[in-house]
Structures are given as C-alpha cells and as structure tokens.
Amino acid sequence: MKKQQKLLNFIITTIYLTLRSLAGIIPLRPWVFCGKIFGKLLCAVATKQRKIMLVNLGIAFGDSKTEQEMKVIARKVFEEFGMIALEWMTLKKLKKERLDKLVEVEGMEHLLAAKKKNPSVILLGAHFGNWEYAHLYYASNINPLSFIVRAIDTPYLEKERISYNTRFGVDILYKQNGLRPAIKNLKSGVDLMLFSDHKVNLSEGLLCNFFGKEVATISVAPALSEKYHAPVIPMFIVRRSDDPIRHKLIFLPELKIDPNDGEEMIAKATQRQNYVFEEIIKKYPQQWLWFHKRWSLHYPEIYK
C-alpha cells in the first residue's frame, strides 16, 4: 500500500508541476477556459460523482426545478470545478497586485460593523467558489487569517499550499490540533476562517435542518463566538458570470447568536447558519461542491 501511495503521489505531483509550468506560459483567460473544458469532460466521465450530485440537487431543488434544470446545474458545477482546479495551478506565482484586480468586494459594511464590536471576527464559509482566492485576498488586504483544514494527501501539494498561503498572510492549521492555536490567534487579533458545510457525525455537531432534511451540522463557529465574543460574519466568493476570470467576495450580515435563546442558543444559531448556506447556494447553485454525500449519515438509502 505504501508503494502504491508513493506512486500515486509521484503521478499527482508530476501532473501538478506540468500544469503549473503551462499556467506560467498561457494567459489566465484561455487557461481558465481550458479549465471549463476540463470540467465538461469530467462531467461526461465521472458518472458516480454526477449521480451523487443529482441526488443532492434533487433534495435541494426537487420541488422547484425540473430534472433538466438540475442536469444543467450539475454540468456547470463540473465546469466551475475545472476552472478552480486550473486557477489553483497559478497560486504559487500569484502576485497580490494581480489578485486585487481579479477580486471585487461586496458587503464590506457588514464586516466593518462586526469589527467595531470586536477587532477579531470568525468568518463562516463553505466549499463554495474559489475559496483560495477569498482567503488570500482577505488576508493580504483586510486582516491576517487562520484557516483550519484537512491536509492534502499528496505531501508536495500540501507543501505548496502552505507556501502560498503563508506568503499572503494565511496561517494553515489542521483539524487534529489546530483549534487551540486558532483561538490563541483569535485573541491576538487574527481572524478565523471556518468551513461548516461538510458532513460530520452527530458526535461532532448538532442535528439541524438543511434543505428540508435533518443532518449533523458543525456548531464550532457559534460556540466560539459565544465564548470569545467574536462576531460571526458569513463570507463567500462567486465567479462573475460576465467575466469568468473575475470573482466577487461577498460579506453577509452577522450571524445572529441570541442570548435570549437560553440553553438552545448555540443550536438555534447553528440552524441559522444552515439557513445562510441555503440562501447563498440557492442564489449561486453552480458554486457549491455538490459531490459529497451530505445527507448519507442520516439518509443512506437515498444514495443507493
């Protein structure tokens, strides 16, 4: 197994280095277009992932969209994935001046209002759009950032991720032991980015409604906010439909965490968190990664 993993890591690293070299030669616009074509090809061959995606889309939009409409969304999700994948190849050599031209900001007033309450904030995010652009832009233009992640399986790619994130002011921490240093950073004025949209066991989260079905949901953002008085600001990034190399970084109003909810304060705030995710996904359905079996722990039969 170790030999197989080493071989796989070698193949992935070789592909990455080749594509990274090409990304340094080909201008960004045709490069991103190549990513879109790559996504179309993936949609054609990745039948298992496409099936999972259509099941998920059926849960979210079965009552409001036709089967054909959901197939179109699925194709666009693959295209978006392809474009993000090739954009990722450019991050090693990406300059701040270039990134600033690719990203515009909407809703800055929400972030500024939160920072008047506390210099440090918790950013609530998801696997949505080109989140790497979002974090790099935020850390280099607004405030340094801690980001808790799962390590990439290929060591060289993980090393690359750490390198460009550090250069832009993002501190990469890991799920296994990253919460304590993240809290320390938060207390010292470094903002914290948390993704709370992925599948977890009930022991890791709270049971909340998401697109009409109950699922275990990560409640770390509301819990940390309540304990350390750091406002939670939802932050997402979307690709502009009129210019596919440009993106819009969106800040939404502060997540409500109401002490009047008493013992249910964190549970109700976590449910509001899911409502935030639902609204942004409904508005930009092609930007969320629908590949994972979000509802499988509680409704395994729907993926058979």
Image (cartoon, helix red, strand yellow):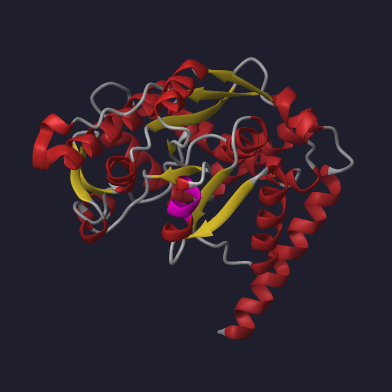
The picture quadrant where one finds residue 241 is top right
- Place of residue 288 in the rendered image (x, y in percent of width and height, measured from the top left): 45, 36
- Place of residue 275 in the rendered image (x, y in percent of width and height, measured from the top left): 27, 29
Q: Residue furthest right?
A: 25
Q: At x 52% / y 19%, what residue is drawn?
A: 108
For this view, does 27 lie left or right of residue 243?
A: right
Which residue occupies the foreground of this view, 241 or 34? 241
Q: At x 32% / y 46%, what residue is drawn?
A: 224
Question: Is residue 275 a member of the stretch shown in magenta?
Answer: no
- Above or below, 269 relative to 164: above
Report the predominant secondary structure element of the magenta stretch. Answer: helix
- Above or below, 258 relative to 148: above
The picture quadrant where one finds residue 232 is top left
Which residue occupies the foreground of this view, 169 or 9? 169
Magenta segment: 182-186
- Place of residue 255 in the rendered image (x, y in percent of width and height, measured from the top left): 32, 29
For this view, does 193 lie left or right of residue 142?
A: left
For this view, does 145 lie left or right of residue 267?
A: right
Which image quadrant: the N terminus? bottom right
Q: At x 24% / y 53%, what residue is drawn?
A: 205
Which residue occupies the foreground of this view, 25 or 79? 25
Which residue occupies the foreground of this view, 160 or 26? 160
- Above or below, 245 relative to 13: above
- Place of residue 7 in the rendered image (x, y in percent of width and height, measured from the top left): 68, 77
